[in-house]
Amino acid sequence: MPQRTQLYIVASRHPRVGKTLLTRLLIEFLRIGGRPLVGYDLNPREPTLAGCFPNLVWPLDIADTRGQMALFDRIVADRWRTTVIDLGGGLFDQFFEVMAQIGFEDEARQRLIQPVVLFISDAAPFTAQTYTKLRAQLEQTIFVPVHNEAASFMMIAKDFPPSSPKFRTIRIPRLSPVVRGLIDRPGFSFSTYMSQQPGGPTEVHSWIGQIFAQFRELELQLLIGELESSLRGGGKEQISQTR
Amino acid sequence: MAKPALILVGADKGGVGKTTVARTLLDYFTAHHVPTRAFDTEMPKGTLKRFHRDVSEVVDATAVADQMRIIDTLSTTDATVTVVDVRAGLMSPTLHALRDIGFLDAVKKGQITFVVFHILGSSIASLNEIEETAPFTTDAEYFLVKNFINNTNFFEWDQATHASYFKKLKDAVIVEVHKLNEMAYEQVELASVPFLTFVANKDAKGETANYSFVLRGYVRHWLGNVWAEYDRVKLLDLFETTAEAAPARAQAGTRS
């Protein structure tokens, strides 16, 4: 059975909610398995992620058609690679608008690409409305909410329901400020840090471990969904069933 | 034998997107399996013919022989619909000619379905064209097309002036054609294929092409919206056709 490749879209409407941090964690998690991977940093003014992963993450400006072609045409052509997108507030609306307008979901389904939005929640009422609207608009995309405890004290779960109860909210625990400074250092690698524990596990080890475990769980659920769908003999059913 | 139908697509001004509208009409009829032929009056090379080679012929609308090729064959052609893309400046002369040869009388008697797509430019001259055209289109299905393809703003002048012109045309129906993404438009121009063929990623020979997925998506979305306008004005109902009335937007694969 040909397996689907994931297109992860780490999205947030607002800055400083941990979007790039989550994308860094996700990329490092996906790299552990050694799978083919590519990333796009859609924050043309401040492409922090692209700076963290040269030759793996490419900065793109999708404000014009050329940038949109560079992104979406490449994604559909590269179906053999897992793609990770860091989508910031500046181009947030335009990204989803273009995605809907060009019929990306249908093409993705045909090419066995599964879009998964990791949506970073925040307390602004408009964010919850946006989440609801996007879920309704993109029926074949899986939505998984993310709660970054360092950015917002609490998340109202009913405002951010995942596409299916089997996909749990990804929780990023709060880190102490001192330790936070460590992971923000240029060149810091989560996976390298995990493999080195000279003095035994630290707060950071446990923090990374918790997040990676949630990624593992998400990937497992995606795989189970796909297997269930193939047993039923359809691709589209998987999505409708997950909603 | 189905009642013959003639569609004139024209404007007295050039550069308002007549051929673009004619192309969307041909694609619309193709999608609905309505047998259609087209005449391109851009002598000698033709513009419409570049995109719709198989169904188009280039003619000289001012030559009697070519007028006969269009009109005299209406009742014998296999095509249910005949689309004529009228070159800039020829709209009024063509309507005069149609009156003189008795075509408009046949329309009045209900022997022929006559449809006019009058493409409007953004200047007041367009409104004057409406006034000139009006006496000839009493028995026609008359569509005024606001074509935004050139990103123009329509009728920014006094609303009362605007209204006074449109009042003279009680039966005219407005159709709006919105702007297609510029790069997508250019790529279809370069490909020289019907919009529908571009969306299907095929070249002029029917071979798989390598058009951008993004640009195909933009064309599909836009074409779906144009066809939604044709659906809205119930264009197909004007013709005697056996076509299955599958919604055009579904055929274009477009969502709202």
Image (tube, coloured by chain):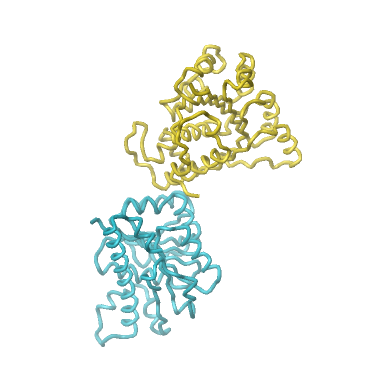
Q: Give the quarter of the image for residue A86.
A: bottom left
**Foreground: A199 or A228?**
A228
Q: How many marks?
A: 0
Rendered residue at 48%/79% (across/down) = A154
Closer to us: A193 or A118: A118
Q: Residue A167: give x, y in percent of width and height.
A: 37, 70
Residue lying at 32% horizontally and 35% vertically, measured from the top left: B207
Q: Is residue B156 left or right of residue B57?
A: right
Viewer-proximal residue among A162 and B10: A162
Which residue is at 38% across, 73% downward?
Answer: A168
B77 up-or-down from B189: above or below: above
In the current view of this chain or complex, which residue is farthest to the bottom? A199
Q: Residue A38 appears in which quarter of the rendering?
A: bottom left
**According to the rendering, which colour does chain A have?**
cyan
In percent of width and height, residue B65 lies at 52, 11
Q: Residue furthest top?
A: B65
Rendering coords of residue B11 (x, y %): 61, 28
Residue appearing at x 51%, y 20% in the figure: B43
Visual hue assigned to chain B: yellow
Q: Please tell me whether residue B61 is drawn above or below residue A210 in the rendered image.
A: above
Picture coordinates of residue B241, whole percent (x, y): 48, 30
